[in-house]
Amino acid sequence: MPSKTAYLEFHTKHKVEFLNITQDVARVVKESGVKEGMVLVNAMHITSSVYINDAESGLIEDFQKWLKKLAPEDISLYKHNLTGEDNAYAHLWRTIMGREVVVAITNGKLDFGPWEQIYYAEFDGQRRKKVLIKIIGE
Ligand code: ZN
């Protein structure tokens, strides 16, 4: 069964960034030659997420505002930060926004619903991070 594994690497300029990775995933799917199958895309870190939603800039700001309200960045709020870490909020945001997405491949293309786009959401960036892409099918 044909399969392909690829990695995307990120080193964001800011601690928090939302990156549309749909074209990167579509390129790897095309390279795989798989016409019918599935692609898994997952963040390989516990302080970043991969999710699917609208590529609308207002909504991306809304996500950040909502996450800050649910789990503020204030380090004094969390036990995790007593270990010397300062990223408890990032672990919580990752859990809320999710680890991975799975998308069907039909006729060699990502088979999305209307407006669906794949995002990598970085919550504790300014260092090297990776996303795994795993494709299976035929
Ligand atoms: Zn941590």
Image (spheres, rainbow, N blue to C red):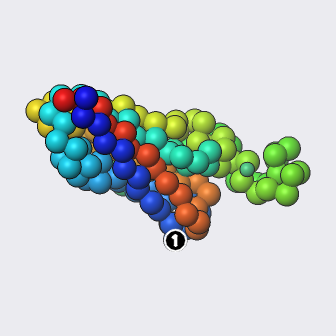
Which residue: 79% across, 56% down? Answer: 85
Instruction: Say whether residue 52 is visible.
Output: no
Spot occupied by residue 9 in the image (x, y as percentages of width and height)? 45, 60
Q: Which residue is mark 1?
A: 13
x 49%, y 54%: residue: 130
- Examine the rendered structure and indicate whether residue 136 appears above or below residue 81: above
Q: How many marks?
A: 1
Residue that appears at 29% across and 32% down: 136
Q: Tell me: 73 left or right of 133.
A: right
- In the picture, the quarter occupied by the N terminus is top left
Question: Taking the image as drawn, is residue 5 in sight?
Answer: yes
Residue closer to the observer: 74 or 2: 2
Front one among 41 and 62: 41
Q: In the picture provided, is 108 more to the left or to the right than 94?
A: left
Q: Position of residue 89 (x, y in %)?
A: 69, 48
In this picture, residue 46 sits left or right of residue 10: right
**Quadrant showing the C terminus:** top left
Q: Residue at x 19, y 36 (%)?
A: 34
Q: Nearer the viewer, residue 41 or 136?
A: 136
Q: Nearer the viewer, residue 60 or 32?
A: 32
Q: Residue furthest front?
A: 1
Mark 1 surroundings within 10 Å by alpha-carbon count, few (fewer than 14), some (14 through 19), many (20 or more): few
Mark 1 residue type? Lys
Q: Position of residue 115 (x, y in %)?
A: 25, 39
Residue at far left of view: 107
Q: Is residue 113 left or right of residue 15?
A: left
On whether ligand 1 comes within 8 Å of the CB at mark 1, the answer is no
- At mark 1, the secondary structure is loop
Residue 116 place in picture, x, y as percent: 28, 38
**Given the current orientation, which residue lies at the most extreme bottom position?**
13
